[in-house]
Amino acid sequence: MNLKKIVAAGVAAVCAVSMAACGGSGSNSKATDMTYDQIKLGETGKDIKADLKLYSNRTDMLKDDYNGTTWKQYLAEFNKLYPNIKVTVEGGTDYANSALTRLQGGDWGDIMMIPAVDKSELGNYFLSYGSLDNMKKEVKYATDKAYDDQVYGVASTGNASGIVYNKKVFKEAGIDKLPTTPDEFISDLKLIKEKTNAIPLYTNYAAGWTMGAWDDYIGGTATGDAKYMNQTLVHTKNPFKDAGDGTHAYSVYKILYDAVADGLTEDDYSTTDWESSKGKMNSGEIATMVLGSWAVSQMQAAGDNAEDVGYMPFPITVDGKQYASSGPDYAFGINKNSSADNQEAAMIFVKWMTEKSNFAYNEGGIPIAADDDNLPDLYADFKSVDLIADEPAKDGEEDLLNDLNSESELNLKNGGDSRVQSIVEHAANKDQSYDDLVKEWNQKWSDAIDSEGVEAK
């Protein structure tokens, strides 16, 4: 069983023993009657005095030398409107795991970025922002953290799945048209190696979590189907088999395997460094990195060549059309055990971050407010690409993907970075073919479907 599931199980056990620690069993219970749609920023809550604690994955924004808007700057702007609501931010490293541990301890404060917990458990820890129907009118991706018609999380920003690339390096290599298929992409990487001094594809293997980004491309991006990730995959045996047309998960991960096997990545994957990679992308020492759109602003801010850093669609074409999965980043969750004043203050802060802070734009993301259809300039190469948001799981299957992830230990889109790292290892060491590797994954996933009693289609 994977670590996230172990910790989540531990959290559930603590809740079963101590409802005071985790908020009881009523999924809709809350201390305040305020809902997100009732808040009018600048008017609602002007008399509230509160000291809030936010537990965040964005440790970089706590540093004064961060090349972007810092938490200190955001909070200063927020306090111009709400001077009596003070927010203290604590950053968590290895956030996917540390946040689950903090949930278990119950000492995470008033707001946190919601980690990977089962949807059925959301109401045990977090306050409802309001009904799903109402929240759909307020924010994008409302269904992502919804259960039993209640929404427990508001996304901090939205991301589309593509590849960060250096425009100048591509030009130096003589590439004047972005690749749209895996074969074209590998060919371009070979041109970059031949004609420039840049690393064609930087894996960022050593950081670990960065490799989990590859999972974000196996849904809508690789299939063109918004239902695939949460409805089709969970009923599909052998999902990693070769579709034969350059689509689906097989083709996504094969790009990574082939790039490493063909010597188109860094010389030693074990010595990669996440922080320094940002500056190397900016300076043209790296040509491409497979990461969400959130990474673009960090790469642009890491040197003097922001204009050289671009974002391209992932090179897969489905029936003549390119798609890009669009989904939420970490979502703000409010502690259901905080005081009524702190809950209301927290909800006000979350709405301010969503509607007034410009956080999404600053981070190169998709704005979360439902009525904001503007996209940052970084999506200039996506004009002919359809953005696809995953449709939610069917009723009664909200936790099925998590269950299959746990049973198979593959952790798809759930921090499965060690699985993706294994692609790099086997490709570099030449000790296992790609087809043999995905054959193992297929067996694990198919066995999990059988073990969970899932009807395969």
Image (cartoon, rainbow, N blue to C red):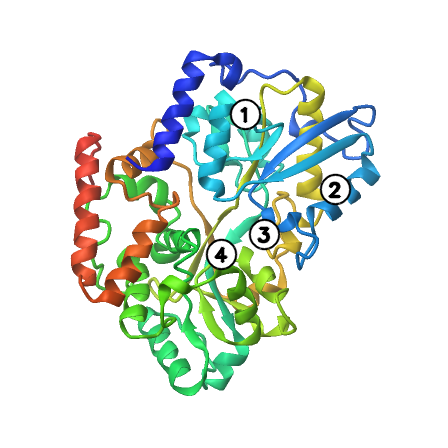
- Image quarter (top left, top right, bottom left or bottom right) of the C terminus: top left
SS assignment at label 4 = loop
Q: Earlier in the sequence, mark 3 or mark 1?
A: 1
Q: CA distance from mark 3 to mark 4?
A: 11 Å
Q: CA distance from mark 2 to mark 4?
A: 26 Å
Q: Residues at badges 3 and 4 in contact (C-beta under 8 Å)?
A: no
Q: Earlier in the sequence, mark 3 or mark 2?
A: 2
Q: Position of residue 378 (x, y in %)?
A: 59, 64
Residue plotted at (77% across, 30% down): 85
Q: Position of residue 320 (x, y in %)?
A: 36, 67
Q: Amino acid at mark 2?
A: Leu
- Residue at the spot of label 4: 292
Q: Residues at badges 1 and 4 in contact (C-beta under 8 Å)?
A: no
137 or 192: which is nearer to us?
Answer: 192
Other-residue count near label 1 (Cα within 10 Å), few / some / many at <14 / 14–19 / ≥20: many
- Residue at the spot of label 1: 126
SS assignment at label 2 = helix
Number of the front mark, 3 or 1:
1
60 to the left or right of 446: right
Number of the front mark, 2 or 4:
2
- Residue at the spot of label 2: 75
Residue 432, numbered circle: none
Q: Amino acid at mark 4?
A: Gly
SS assignment at label 1 = loop
Q: Residues at badges 1 and 2 in contact (C-beta under 8 Å)?
A: no
Above or below, 267 relative to 340: below
Residue plotted at (73% across, 46% down): 72
Q: Residues at badges 2 and 4 in contact (C-beta under 8 Å)?
A: no
Above or below, 86 relative to 16: below
